[in-house]
Amino acid sequence: MSAGSGLADINSPGSMVVTDAGLETWLVFDHGIDLRWFAAYPLAATEEGRALLAEYYGHYADIARSIGAAVLLDAPTWRANPDWAEALGHDRVVLSDLIRAAVGVVADVRRQWTGSQPFLIGGAVGPRGDGYAIGSMMDADTAAGYHSFQITAMASAGVDVVDALTLGYVDEAVGIARAAEATGLPVVISFTVETDGRLPSQMSLAEAIEQTDAATNGYVTHFMVNCAHPSHFDHVLDRSAPWAARIGGLRANASQLGHAELDEMVELDRGDPDDLAARYVELRASLPNLHVLGGCCGTDHRHVAAIAAAWQASTAR
């Protein structure tokens, strides 16, 4: 499926797009994988790792195909930036090869796609540092320069769109958007929020979206929220506000706990898939352009299947 027509199709009014969920928690808690620094991309280096990743992505492709929806699956590259790679002992040559292999896993799943709707490959980009705790912050130019290595490598590997996930402050989002624009790739920016609905930087979600749009001349295809439960931000949404109309996707956590509490847990809080699905449907009243539906920490294909079914049912009413 071509990037151009596919991206236009999945962003058309009334479309529903299935995306994936909590890859890292699925690997750690369901398969006992020891993910150093929560990095999944090194699994692409082995046949066994690639098979496990293909199993994961296959679940979401199956969901999308079964309901006639488009699908956008993010390559396991959320931690594939130079700082985290260095911590894992990977130089930039190795990192580039592993990014290509990671994108290749999703490309292999796409080659087996028999659905009638588009199948797009996203290149997941995570924050340079900890997504939950803001330490030193980059300005936008520094962020663009830093993230350009990973984004260029993903562009070369054949992703259709850059999906920047779990961002906690605006300048990094702006830098990633500029780096994506330099490659000609579209970009989706996803902010995470704390239980009060504010970013880890303490900026409001409204300000973050408005400032990112202003600094990038509206280049971002749409915005998302991820790694937060709907109860953390539903109270800050305003359907009448232009910034709310810019939110096109949601990848929520299963748990209602905050980031600090989740970091301390030794058992996974999987929440209630049906309750989470109902909350997604309720958000339609506040987010008129919400259409990319997936999950984050603690969620898996069972949550996404429940969300997709509930969404379809609400559309049919």
Image (cartoon, rainbow, N blue to C red):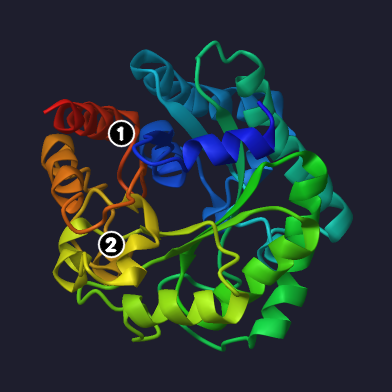
- For residue 44, say whether it is visible: no
Q: Is residue 39 above or below residue 49?
A: below
Please tell me which residue is depicted at 56% across the width and 69% down the height of the picture.
218
Helix, strand or loop status at disc 1: helix
Mark 2 crowdedness (10 Å alpha carbons): few <14, some 14-19, many ≥20: some
Q: Quadrant of the C terminus?
A: top left
- For residue 154, say whether it is visible: yes
Question: Would you name the residue on which mark 1 appears?
Answer: 304
Q: Nearer the viewer, residue 56 or 292?
A: 292
Disc 2 marks a residue whose amino acid type is Leu
Q: Quadrant of the N terminus?
A: top right
Q: Is residue 229 above or below residue 113?
A: below
Disc 1 marks a residue whose amino acid type is Val
User: Of marks 2 and 1, which one's residue comes earlier in the chain?
Assistant: 2
Q: Mark 2, mark 1: which one is toward the viewer?
A: 1
Question: Would you name the residue on which mark 2 appears?
Answer: 262
Position of residue 10 measured from the top left corner of the image (x, y, whole percent): 49, 37
Among the 4 quarters of the image, the one containing residue 178: bottom right
Helix, strand or loop status at disc 2: helix
Position of residue 79 measured from the top left corner of the image (x, y, whole percent): 60, 57
- Tell me how far mark 2 sits from mark 1, CA to CA: 20 Å
Residue 75 located left or right of residue 22: right
Please tell me which residue is depicted at 40% across the width and 38% down the height of the picture.
26
